[in-house]
């Protein structure tokens, strides 16, 4: 492997983006050559550096697939061997999964490392990585516990840079809970990095201090450390450092246009990354489980009688369960049809039948104007179309994130601007179909209410996930109203209550309309 050390260095310590491309090209050629010559372990080595280069370039999906390909090759050699390579690949997949917002998968991979790793320094790194996942999930107390454990490991091995990283992360998590020791830990981490002249770490510490002071409403110090981070990032000539430092500084300023621009850019970037998720990790886990099932099947052949008895019993249970569920499903569908028909009937009577009667009255009056009747008929058509749209079935096979986005932006027009933030940060696939339908219908009701009554020209919806709860904040700049729970608002409240959520309304005349939903 000595002949490849030059290309290893290009990937581990690139000076230019072209270095990564050059290193990537070399290891891809080596991988193909090694696979053709049945040098499987050498191909695994190549794939490790391919995955690292792809991650640094920013193609996280490709990087993830390369790492998974390497794991499959290791499984062919020895399912439980080659722990050094497995540790590297598991950690890599944990980091990329975190960056792709697949937090539960990231935690699974990091915990796989802890099961086979016995080196204190590496264990400290993994504990720190687990803490980072919980910090991203805003579960700060859990994150702090992992950081403290990583700190204890780092102290025993006297690794000052690892210690500095843990202290910085620990301080940031403590800051979010307003704990008094937060600032001291961030400063300790900074001092260790200054002593080692570790530029990347110093930039990170300055950014952490800027964030700390911003959270504590000290704009002067927040800007001071944001400028320090930006100056050092500019001096380092690393564009990623500079972009992050500029973004941090932008977030401190109170210019609403700057903040809105940054939030929209962050939302777009998050959405793009979500779209790239092709479930490569899930596929690897499925393939591995399929292999395990095949082995178990071979073992069970030694006891055929027990196998067939068990299968017969399971078949009987499955048949019994099928008929129970079918009967229950039929009853639920009948109730749903009845409720839907009742609601549509009432709406047709209240909104369409009365209008039709008025048109008939006009036609009986010789003084009516032809144009008036045409206008009335167009209004009736519009109401009928809206009722059809509101009552149509929701396609649950469709990507729910796309369905919500399409729904909200269908209300956008030349006179109404609809702005959304954070839709892509919600793990919609974890929600039950009942909750998805409730959320969809409530948002549809709110947007329809806005269109009919509010006279708003700006609507903002912010989606957020904190701990295990989803919050949706709706706000428009319309004429507002004196709050009174007429049918539409009562329907939204009933829907949210049925899925154990809460919904609150806030409005007054000429002061817009606000809704906060927590699920």
Image (cartoon, rainbow, N blue to C red):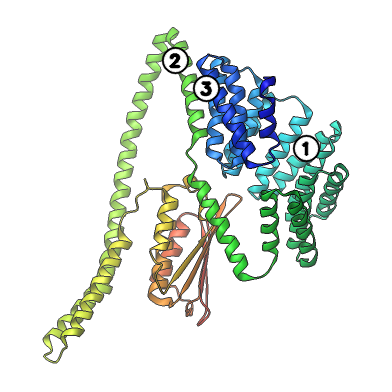
Residue appearing at x 30%, y 41% in the figure: 327
Q: Earlier in the sequence, mark 2 or mark 3?
A: 3
Q: CB of mark 2 within 8 Å of CB of mark 3?
A: no
Q: Position of residue 295 (x, y in %)?
A: 48, 15
| Image depth: mark 3 or mark 1 in front | 3
Identify the secondary structure beneath mark 3: helix
139 lies above or below 475 = above
Left or right: residue 255 versus residue 498 is right
Q: Earlier in the sequence, mark 2 or mark 1?
A: 1
Residue 430 visible from this viewpoint: yes
Residue to which mark 1 is pinned? 149
Identify the secondary structure beneath mark 2: helix
Left or right: residue 423 versus residue 182 is left
Q: Position of residue 455 (x, y in %)?
A: 43, 78
Residue appearing at x 20%, y 85% in the figure: 372
Residue to which mark 3 is pinned? 32
Give the CA distance from mark 2 to mark 3: 34 Å
Question: Which numbered dot is residue 479?
Answer: none
Residue to which mark 2 is pinned? 297
Which residue is farthest top?
302
Residue appearing at x 80%, y 62% in the figure: 224
Residue 212 visible from this viewpoint: no
Q: Position of residue 107 (x, y in %)?
A: 62, 37
Q: Position of residue 171 (x, y in %)?
A: 78, 50
| Badge 3 density bin: few <14, some 14–19, many ≥20, Cα 10 Å | some
97 lies above or below 444 = above
């Amino acid at each position: 492997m000595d002949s490849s050390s030059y290309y290893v260095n290009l990937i581990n310590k690139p000076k230019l983006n072209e270095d990564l491309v050059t290193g990537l090209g070399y290891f891809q050629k080596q991988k193909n050559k090694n696979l053709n010559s049945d040098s499987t372990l050498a191909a695994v080595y190549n794939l490790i550096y391919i995955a690292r280069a792809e991650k640094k370039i920013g193609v996280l999906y490709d990087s993830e697939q390369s790492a998974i390909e390497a794991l499959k090759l290791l499984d062919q050699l020895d399912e439980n061997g080659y722990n050094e390579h497995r540790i590297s690949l598991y950690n890599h997949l944990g980091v990329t999964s975190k960056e792709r917002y697949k937090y539960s998968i990231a935690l699974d991979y990091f915990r796989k490392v802890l099961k086979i790793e016995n080196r204190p320094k590496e264990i400290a790194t993994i504990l720190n990585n687990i803490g980072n996942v919980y910090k991203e999930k805003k579960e700060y107390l859990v994150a702090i516990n992992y950081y403290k454990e990583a700190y204890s490991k780092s102290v025993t091995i006297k690794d000052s840079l690892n210690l500095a990283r843990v202290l910085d992360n620990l301080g940031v998590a403590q800051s979010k809970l307003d704990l008094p020791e937060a600032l001291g830990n961030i400063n300790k981490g900074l001092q260790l990095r200054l002593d080692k002249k570790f530029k990347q770490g110093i930039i990170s510490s300055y950014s952490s201090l800027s964030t700390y002071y911003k959270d504590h409403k000290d704009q002067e110090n927040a800007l001071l450390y944001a400028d320090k981070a930006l100056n050092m990032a500019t001096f380092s000539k690393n564009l990623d450092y500079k972009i992050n430092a500029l973004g941090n500084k932008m977030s401190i300023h109170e210019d609403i246009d700057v903040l809105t621009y940054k939030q929209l850019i962050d939302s777009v970037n998050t959405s793009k990354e979500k779209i790239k998720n092709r479930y490569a990790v899930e596929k690897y886990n499925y393939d591995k489980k399929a292999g395990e099932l095949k082995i178990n099947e071979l073992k069970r052949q030694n006891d055929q009688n027990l196998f067939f008895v068990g299968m017969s019993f399971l078949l009987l249970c499955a048949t019994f369960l099928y008929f129970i569920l079918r009967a229950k499903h039929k009853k639920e569908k009948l109730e749903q049809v009845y409720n839907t028909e009742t609601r549509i009937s009432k709406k047709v009577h209240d909104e369409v039948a009365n209008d039709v009667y008025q048109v008939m009255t006009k036609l009986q009056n010789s003084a009516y104007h032809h144009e008036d009747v045409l206008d009335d008929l167009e209004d009736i058509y519009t109401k009928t179309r809206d009722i059809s749209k509101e009552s149509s079935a929701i396609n649950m096979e469709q990507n729910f994130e796309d369905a919500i986005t399409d729904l909200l932006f269908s209300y956008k027009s030349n006179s109404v601007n609809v702005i959304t933030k954070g839709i892509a940060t919600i793990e919609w696939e974890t929600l039950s179909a009942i909750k998805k339908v409730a959320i969809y219908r409530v948002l549809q009701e709110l947007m329809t209410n806005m269109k009919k009554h509010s006279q708003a020209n700006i609507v903002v919806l912010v989606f957020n996930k904190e701990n295990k709860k989803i919050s949706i904040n709706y706000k428009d700049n319309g004429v507002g109203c004196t709050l009174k729970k007429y049918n539409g608002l009562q329907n939204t409240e009933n829907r949210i209550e049925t899925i154990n959520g809460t919904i609150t309304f806030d409005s007054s005349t000429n002061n817009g309309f606000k809704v906060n939903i927590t699920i």
